[in-house]
Image (cartoon, rainbow, N blue to C red):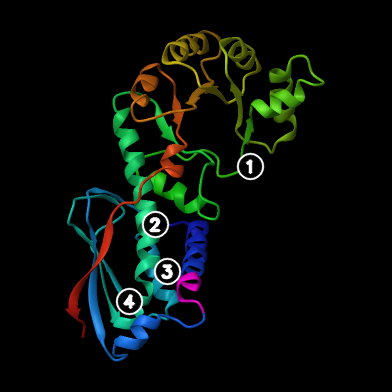
Amino acid sequence: MQFNASEAAECERILRWGLEEDLGEAGDLTSQAVIDPARRWAARIVARRAGVVAGLPSLAILAGLRGGSIEVQLLAGDGPVEKGRPIAHLSGPARELLAVERTMLNLLSRLSGIATLTARYVAAVCGCKARICDTRKTTPGWRRLEKYAVRVGGGLNHRTGLFDAVLIKDNHLAEIARTQPDPIPWAVARARENAPQGAVVEVEVDSLAQLARALDARPDIVLLDNMTPENLAVAVEMRDRRAPDVLLEASGGISLETVAAIARSGVDRISVGAITHSAPALDLALDDEGDAP
């Protein structure tokens, strides 16, 4: 996989910030003190644990930010990787490689951790129709890259932000209920009238009674919040009878221990905040390969 234009721009911005944060005004004091400026070095990035690597297109962006002095050879693409597998070869001035090492590995490890955890959720629902989706519970400034990593792991991106889809949540409904006795159909109708043409309209419910009102309003998706697998199965039966074209999405407190039972209920989508907000970094390292020509 490759970054699209917005993902590449976000990656460049993150790398710039990371390097500025690490190098400050003085640069790498350690390397400047002890490494010969003429020394050229070769190294490789290695996966210390099996997982799913994401973010390798960032290496070419990083090389460009350093004036092209670092040469990058990818030994793998974004996707599954075995423990001990080299995924990229780097060469260039030793000072340059040491200056970018931590920023480079931080980004790759973070994105690879998200892709790896997403892949575990996807594997857990194998055999069911449900797709694993991300949420807006992302690191500020990293959203596009973290959603890219979700796709690498086999997941599905939910809306990018507030700007590209309608999701009428419980707080919206609570506010609307102050003036409207039946807020769900009112909100869906207003969304259809006022949102840009083609925008997805989704509404959140937390009871089967609310679901009935939502299905009658015909949104594109109904978000079923914190329902048990048993209630989710009832919700699927209700949807199939009343509005088979409406998608059902389960959400709320989803874990690796519960996701399979939720998928077996027959829902179409399962949104999991944990794949972005709680993914542990994948252990990647930069290993010495000696002198470079």
Residue 204 painted magenta: no
Task: Give residue 100's position: percent from left, percent from top.
Answer: 38, 72
Dot 3 amino acid type: Ile
Task: Give residue 2's position: percent from left, percent from top.
Answer: 39, 57
Which stretch is magenta?
A: 19-24
User: Which sits earlier in the primary sequence, circle 3 or circle 4?
Assistant: 3
Q: Crowdedness of circle 1 by 10 Å Cα count: few (<14), some, many (20+)?
A: few
> How much space separates mark 3 and mark 4, taking CA atoms?
14 Å
Main secondary structure of the magenta stretch: helix
> Which sits in the foreground, 197 or 148?
148
On residue 61, which mark appears? Answer: 3
> Which sits in the foreground, 24 or 261?
24
Mark in the foreground, 3 or 4:
4
Query: How many labels, in total?
Result: 4
Q: Residue at x 63, y 36 (%)?
A: 199
On residue 97, which mark appears? Answer: 4
User: Which sits earlier in the primary sequence, circle 3 or circle 1?
Assistant: 3
> How much space separates mark 4 and mark 1, taking CA atoms?
39 Å
Dot 2 amino acid type: Gln
Q: Residue at x 35, y 48 (%)?
A: 113
Quadrant in which the C terminus appears: bottom left
Task: Judge whether 153 appears above or below 16 on screen.
Answer: above
Left or right: 60, with 236 as reference point: left
> How much space separates mark 3 and mark 2, taking CA atoms?
12 Å
Task: Judge whether 177 appears above or below 33 on screen.
Answer: above
Q: Crowdedness of circle 2 by 10 Å Cα count: few (<14), some, many (20+)?
A: some
Is residue 69 in view?
A: no
> How much space separates mark 1 and mark 2, taking CA atoms?
25 Å
Residue at mark 1: 162
Q: Crowdedness of circle 4 by 10 Å Cα count: few (<14), some, many (20+)?
A: many
On residue 205, which mark appears? Answer: none
User: Which sits earlier in the primary sequence, circle 4 or circle 1?
Assistant: 4
